[in-house]
Amino acid sequence: MGIVVVTTVTSLLIAQHQNSASYDAVVDDLFRHQLNSFQQEQEIRLAIAAQEVQRLADSVRLFAALEANDPEVYKIAGDELRLGDFAFFRLLNAQGESIAPPEDGRAGMRGAQVLHRQLIPEIAQERPADPKVQLGFVQIRQGDDAQVFRILASPITNFGTIVGTLILGQRIKGLGPKRKGEQAAHNLQFGFWLEGQLIGDEISGAVRESLTASLAGTQAQVLTDGEIRAAGETYRFERFLLNQSSSYPPAYLVSVFSLAEFQSQQRVLMLRIALTGLVALLMAALVGRWLSRQLAQPIRDLVSATREIRKGNYGVKLPPSSTREMNTLAESFNDMAAGLALKDRYHSVLQRVTDPQVAEELIAGRVRLGGELREVTVVFCDIRGYTAMTVGRDPTEVIKILNGHLSALTHIVQAHRGVISQFVGDAIFTLFGAPKSYGDDAQRAVHCAWAMMCERERMNRESAEPLRIGIGIASGQMVAGCIGAESRSDYVVVGERVNLAARLCSSAAAGEILIDEETRIRAGSAVSSEPLEPLSLKGFSQPMPVFRILGVHDSLS
């Protein structure tokens, strides 16, 4: 749905931008076409004016009449000129003074005095100084009628000397009173901006007022363009200077184009795109709702099942789904749950048959069949008088007593980060430094033995069947690892120091902890001990130095 919204909005923006650019280009082409047509027609008139002046320049009679300011000069010029669609002509003498035309004839244009008052003073004051044709535009009123005329003023020269000036006037068509039923093509209107006044009946009403206000606020320049608002519509306009470098006042061709039709088409296009996007959005919503219904319930079941897995309930099962993908996911989840359940059972069984630390190392794959040399401290602990205690007793009762004893001591070993390698009858075989060393293994081993002895004494005070234990500890280099086969192995340590710990345990009296010299050195000041007479132990050729633990001092981290 988000993609549909983004695509629709992007399409709207792109379409609006492209349409605006295309329409601007079309309007600009219309403006340029109108300007080019006007300028081409104007160039033709300039060429005609130059030809007429050249014709007059060959008339000796005209030169004499111009010098004498003879009113007959208009008759002489009229005989020479071919006015065509020029509305009137005027003549100036060599001094740039106007020669009054007769009342009748084309020179006067049925209003010689009106034309004389409006046109001649401007020309007399701004007499062309070079031989080029000067271009100007004037508005001439005759009663209620007003017309715009193109004025062409060309000097008449004879051997490089100006002997007079020919002024030709041509009415600009389309700027008079608008005929009934006439409409501008392509909504394009034009007029003239002349001496701060907008001239032309095509542009009328509110458009004229807005355009006049806009043009009056701009500085004179070759080209100005912009937009105006009038009668609730937007209009584009451009203003072109028609007589640059002329001695006449600047005149501008003003073109105006209504954007109402374009904006209407733009709104229709935007509405169509928006409706298309809305339909696509509704379809996406319906499809999304249908898909969500297909996916929501299986997802909720999956979330609920994962929470059960987190709680340790590996027996949870996901039901089959109606979709192939979710059904595949449910099958994979059920297989995963079954695998986790099996792994959990293996882990539980493994922790029951071996020490938790060894179990974690085995699961992680860091303990393999074989061995490695390690510095290890071994602790042996067994019950004194165990054989005599079991004579005549029910085996079930013996196992119960033994399990209670071993469980209590096991908790102490684990609290001191020791590893129980084996339970041998009533004896506990414990390792410190394998498979993982904490750096103070000997000290931990002595603290653990002291805590085991204290715990046993506490249990004896509360038990109807007190048990007495003896402990032996030895430290040194041993081989540690899994011994057996790939299908069945035990994590053990072997070496001379293992045998020494077992012999010290056998030699220890009830409530006594015996350690070898290496353990005493490694434990340091953390324990208190006293030396005993060296013991001759089975399997050792020389008497072994032995120490009895009297207490422990420093706490372990």
Image: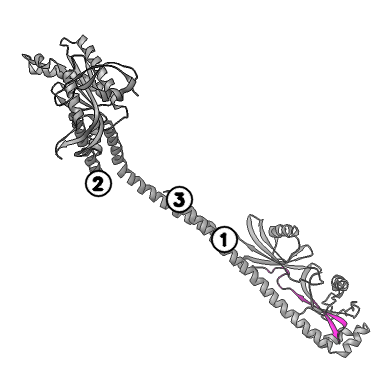
Q: Is residue 88 left or right of residue 179?
A: right
In this rendered view, identify the residue nearer to me: 396 or 122: 396
Q: Which stretch appears magenta?
A: 152-179
Of the numbered discs 2 and 1, the one sitting upstream in the chain is 1
Which residue is outermost to the left? Answer: 392
Q: Which mark is residue 328?
A: 2
> Is residue 167 a member of the stretch shown in magenta?
yes
**Residue type highlighted by circle 1:** Ser
Residue 161, x across and y down, in percent: 88, 84
Residue 489, x across and y down, in percent: 16, 35
Alpha-carbon neighbours of circle 3 within 10 Å: few (<14), some, or many (≥20)? Answer: some
**Residue at the location (15% across, 18% down)?**
402
**Residue type highlighted by circle 3:** Val
The answer to whether residue 250 shows anywhere in this view is yes
Residue under numbered circle 3: 5
Which residue is outermost to the front? Answer: 542
Of the numbered discs 1 and 3, the one sitting upstream in the chain is 3
Whole-number angstrom distance, CA of label 3 to CA of label 2: 33 Å
Q: Are marks 3 and 2 in contact (CB under 8 Å)?
A: no
> Is residue 352 a member of the stretch shown in magenta?
no
Alpha-carbon neighbours of circle 2 within 10 Å: few (<14), some, or many (≥20)? Answer: few
